[in-house]
Image (cartoon, grey):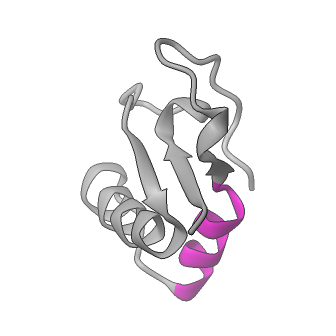
Amino acid sequence: MERVMADCRRFESDSNCQLTIIGPADDVVAAAVQHAVASHGHQDTPEMREQLRAMLEPESAYVSGERTPEPFPA
């Protein structure tokens, strides 16, 4: 099973969030949704889950340390 990553360092945020979640896609999306709701004030909607899934990166894209954040997609 391919492992993927959701990396908060990828996007600009008020809290300068540094969380990275790596694992199977369904598990990463579930954990990322919980994090987005609890830490970033997002609503858990089907649209948000689709958006998170679209932003997943392959595990091989992981780089430790700082990452230059980009604007969050609209």
Q: Is residue 22 left or right of residue 12?
A: left
- Which quarter of the rendering shows the N terminus? bottom right
Hey, which residue is sitting farthest top in the picture? 65
Q: Look at 55% across and 76% down and name the residue there.
A: 49
Between 13 and 6, which is closer to the camera in this rendering? 6
Q: Is residue 60 above or below residue 22?
A: above
Hey, which residue is sitting farthest left in the picture? 38
Q: Which residues are magenta?
A: 46-56
Residue 30 position, x and y percent, is 38, 72
- Which quarter of the rendering shows the C terminus? bottom right
Residue 11 position, x and y percent, is 60, 35
Q: Is residue 37 above or below residue 30?
A: above
Residue 2 position, x and y percent, is 60, 62
Q: Look at 43% across and 30% down and name the residue there.
A: 14
Residue 8 position, x and y percent, is 48, 39
Q: Main secondary structure of the magenta part?
A: helix
Between 21 and 24, which is closer to the camera in this rendering? 24
Residue 57 lies within the magenta run: no
Q: Look at 54% across and 49% down and name the residue there.
A: 5
Hey, which residue is sitting farthest bottom in the picture? 46
Q: Is residue 4 above or below residue 9?
A: below
Q: Is residue 73 left or right of residue 62?
A: right
Between 23 and 40, which is closer to the camera in this rendering? 23
Figure disc tally: 0
Between 33 and 61, which is closer to the camera in this rendering? 61
Q: Look at 64% across and 37% down and name the residue there.
A: 60
